[in-house]
Image: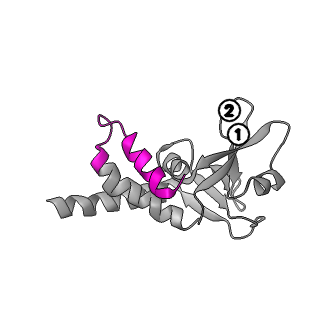
Amino acid sequence: MTLPAQAQRLIDQTPPQILDPQIMAQTVVPLLLAQAEKLACAQACLWVGAGGESAILTLQHRQDPTQTRRALYGFADSEDARRHPEFDPRSMTVTEIPILDLLFRVLTDAEIDLLCFFPAGAQGQNIIAFERRDLQNQLKSRARAHRSLIA
């Protein structure tokens, strides 16, 4: 599915009692599209556990192991996802998800602190990280700018 089609689907599926679809179209979707452009792919591959849930990893800070973050690993290529050293084929499978859905989930899911995205062939190099807190702050800035334009 193309990025414009993914964007339109997100807008169309926005429950109006939760968020005005116009706000979704003018603030959330442009933010997600801007992030997706950094990845140069329309789909992402994720690890999924036996129960169908996304595999969320707990990462520890190198200097202070008491500091942890919950992360999703996303991959541009399913083979890269399977070759990653932390992939466990006995308890995980790889599934494909539209990239805007993945970014929206990182933005809105309080259980996820971070998305570590591995571009095709990255093998641990050139990982692109998206922190939920940063995405939320960018969204707040966009919302403020949008409100000042319509006021």
Q: Are marks 2 and 1 in contact (CB under 8 Å)?
A: yes
**Which stretch did the figure color magenta?**
1-22
Q: Which residue is mark 2?
A: 52
Most extreme residue toward the left is 151
State whether residue 72 appears in this view: yes
Q: Identify the disc placed on residue 12.
A: none
Cα separation, mark 2 vs mark 1, equals 6 Å
State whether residue 67 appears in this view: no
The question of residue 75 being in magenta is answered with no
Relative height, residue 57 to residue 30 (above, below) = above
Relative height, residue 91 to residue 118 (above, below) = above
| Whole-percent x, y for residue 22 in the image | 28, 49
- Which colour style is shown? one colour
Q: Which residue is mark 1?
A: 48
Q: Secondary structure at mark 2?
A: loop
| Whole-percent x, y for residue 37 in the image | 52, 66
The amino acid beneath tag 2 is: Gly
In the figure, is residue 100 to the left or right of 139?
Answer: right
